Amino acid sequence: MKLLIIGDIHYPREPGIFIKLLNLIEETSPDILAICGDIINFANKHWLRKFFRKIHRRKKNLKVVAVMGNHDFWLSKSAMRRGMTSWDLVDVYSETFEEFGDFLLWDSPFMEEVEIVGVPGWYDYSFAPWHLGFKKKDFDRGVIDNWIWNDVVYTKFNMSNEEVLKENLKHLEKQLTLAHSNKVIVLLHFVPLRDFVRFTNDRFKDFWTAYYGSDKLAVPIIQSNKVKYVFFGHISIKHLLSKRVFKNGILFESVDISDDISNHVILDIPA
């Protein structure tokens, strides 16, 4: 069983990366394409269906197993006016995945030849550069030097970021409880360990670390004693301290391919 594990395709915004991904699928011939979120640059069922058609056209019998990323939760202004929330997109994505015989991780784990669990995750400002004098209200606003964190504009969960994270943790814990193996693979979108966070002491650059993720994502993973691998995306490898970290016998590894297709991982699981 061969897995190709990647994150942050941002289809169709990054056509060059997508073409490289299609070529990589053809070259490596994986059984499972595992995606750590940001499949689409802006939630859109039309583009998601087009993405699946092109992926499956390149390799028959390929199973896509994925979590959503923050870009996958982005809503258009018209969708917001219609009263749609970002949570509604989970059902939109789930239905589209099922249409193509694929699997969106949220309510239950993927349990076939290999066990995969996962959620997008979210952030609670635990990675924020508090030492630079920022206040929580600064990160709630998401604005610095007239630059704004796009989740503030394009997502609508009707709850705080901390509450969004708690909802993700609830689903992650449920999936881990259902898993049987002690070699479970976890897919996340957001960074699950502070060990990956690089600070520069530049107020503008470090401001954005608040939105990298949360250490709380790693807690149920480590406590479960079932997990062997954790993969995540969201932040380009050039902004992290390292590509991989081993902690409590678990490999945590970045697979964000938005800047570099070589940041993918190929995992061979013995039958």
Image: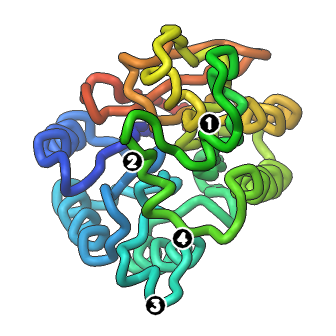
Q: Crowding near pointer 4: few (<14 within 10 Å), some, many (20+)?
A: many
Q: Rounded to the nearest whole Å, what is the CA distance between mark 1 and mark 3? A: 30 Å
Check disc 2 and report the residue beneath it: 33
Image quadrant holding the C terminus, namely top right
Residue closer to the observer: 179 or 209: 209
Check disc 1 and report the residue beneath it: 213
The amino acid pointed to by label 1 is: Gly
Q: Residue at x 46, y 29 (%)?
A: 267
Residue closer to the observer: 60 or 173: 173
Using residue 86 as the reference point, say whether residue 47 is left or right of it: left
Residue 23, quarter of the rendered image: top left
Q: Crowding near pointer 3: few (<14 within 10 Å), some, many (20+)?
A: few
The amino acid pointed to by label 4 is: Ser
Q: Rounded to the nearest whole Å, what is the CA distance between mark 4 and mark 3? A: 12 Å
Check disc 3 and report the residue beneath it: 82
Q: Residue at x 52, y 54 (%)?
A: 67
Is disc 3 placed on a helix, strand or loop? loop
Of marks 2 and 3, which one's residue comes earlier in the chain?
2
Using residue 126 as the reference point, say whether residue 98 is left or right of it: left
Residue closer to the observer: 33 or 31: 33
Query: Closer to the camera: disc 2 or disc 3?
Result: 3
Tell me residue 86's x, y (percent).
Answer: 54, 70
Whether 263 is drawn above or below 183: the answer is above
The amino acid pointed to by label 2 is: Leu
Tell me residue 42's x, y (percent).
Answer: 33, 62
Q: Residue at x 44, y 60 (%)?
A: 153
Q: Crowding near pointer 2: few (<14 within 10 Å), some, many (20+)?
A: many
Residue 53, quarter of the rendered image: bottom left
Checking the image for residue 86, the label placed there is 4
Q: Residue at x 79, y 48 (%)?
A: 176
Whether 125 is drawn above or below 202: the answer is below
Q: Are marks 4 and 3 in contact (CB under 8 Å)?
A: no
